[in-house]
Structures are given as C-alpha cells and as structure tokens.
Amino acid sequence: MMRRHRLAVAVVALALVAAACGDGDDSGSNGADEPRATAAGTEAAGQPTEPAGDPQGGAFDNLTGTYEGAWSNETFQTTAEVTIELAVEGNAATFTLTLTDGPDGSPFGIAAPEPKVLEGTVIAGDLAVELLGDELFGDLSALITAGGEVAVTASMDGVPGVSGLTVTGTITEAGMDLRYTVSYPDGTEASGTATLTKT
C-alpha cells in the first residue's frame, strides 16, 4: 500500500502545500527507486536534490530601482516632480515616495510631505502593501500584480478636506503610468496622472 504524506512549508505570510507519495513496499515495486518530493525539490534515484527555487519566482526583480517623473493634476492644472524608489529582496518590498510642490500648487492641497517609506510583502505572486492609521494616507491598500497592474486606495485621513484617493495604472521595467483620483467630502473629485521613467 502507498502511504500519503502531506508537506507544509510556510514562507512569510505564504503557505505552500504539496501532496507527495512516499516509498512503496517491496510487494508492489519492480525494484527501481521512484522519485520523491522533498522540501528542497524533487530527488530522483541516485541523483542530488535540485532546489525548488524562489517560490515567488523573482517576478519583481526587474522592477527594483528608482522611478522619476511628474504628477499632473488635470483638474487644477498643477504639476510637480515625483520620485518612487522600489526595492525588493526575497518576499520583502520597500517603497520610498517623494513628492514635491509645484509652482502652481502642491500634492493633495497641502505642503509636500517628507519622503514616505511604505513596506510591502510579496504574497502569492503579488506585491501587497497594507497600512492602518497612517498619519498621511490613513488606511491604505495597494497591490501590484506579477503582470504589472497597479491598484491603490487610501482614506487620506491625514489630509484635511480630502476624503479619499484611488490610483490605477501599470509598472514595467521601463517606467510607471498612473492615473489618480482625489475625492472630497462634498462629493467632488480631482483627477490627474503620474508618469515616471526608471533611471
């Protein structure tokens, strides 16, 4: 009779579960050793184990770097520079967001904040950032998929007169193309874009 074993490997917040067959008994074997699954990879008869590799597949390695460009508020006709630094090491990611004031206005209608560092985690192939009660963004949820799709929502509790922020767009190894909408308590909105090139 074949005995079934279950192997669970926890990687940060990600649980990868694989089912593998164990060794058979002599009565059901033709005498040849069968390959078996191990925590490090698949081990063939008489062969060394091959590493299974990074479970995330390094999907974000080519996105690591500095992106520079400008945000442009289409509603109020204001613009200024923006820089985003992205670092990914294993399953941990760090974003450093630097906004500047423009000659005709400032981001979110307030003085540009100090550079903001956001920490994220690569989970199931996607890069996720979750903040609760941040002094600027309030509650924030951000997701970058392995395919480069970007989606961000924030309550913007730290900005008087602003009730929310949404950002959508794409990121590639060449740059970022983003569109954002700022919501106000009276139901009105302001929209704009941010275009950045990886340097």
Image: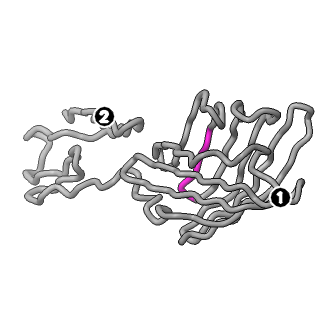
Look at 11% across and 60% down and name the residue there. Answer: 47
Q: Quadrant of the N terminus?
A: top left
Horizontal arrangement in the rendering, residue 17 relative to residue 193 (left or right): left
Magenta-drawn stretch contains 142: yes
Label 1, secondary structure: give it: loop
Instruction: Pick whichever, 63 or 159, lies toward us.
Output: 159
- Amino acid carrying mark 2 in the image: Ala
Residue, x 73% and y 59% (percent of image)? 71
- First in sequence: mark 2 vs mark 1: 2
Instruction: Please state which of residues 18 and 162 is positioned toward the viewer in this rendering.
Output: 162
Q: What span is in magenta?
A: 141-147
Which residue is the site of mark 2?
8
Q: Position of residue 153 (x, y in %)?
A: 69, 40
- Which numbered marker is on residue 6? none
Dot 2 lies on which element? Answer: strand
Q: Residue 2's quadrant in the figure?
A: top left
Q: Are marks 2 and 1 in contact (CB under 8 Å)?
A: no
Left or right position of 161 against 186: left
Residue that badge 1 annotates: 104
State which quadrant residue 174 falls in: bottom right
Q: Residues within 10 Å of mark 2 (few under 14, many from 20)?
A: few
Queried whether the magenta region covers residue 118, the answer comes back as: no
For the residue marked with disc 1, what is the amino acid? Asp
Query: What is the tally of numbered marks visible in this picture?
Result: 2
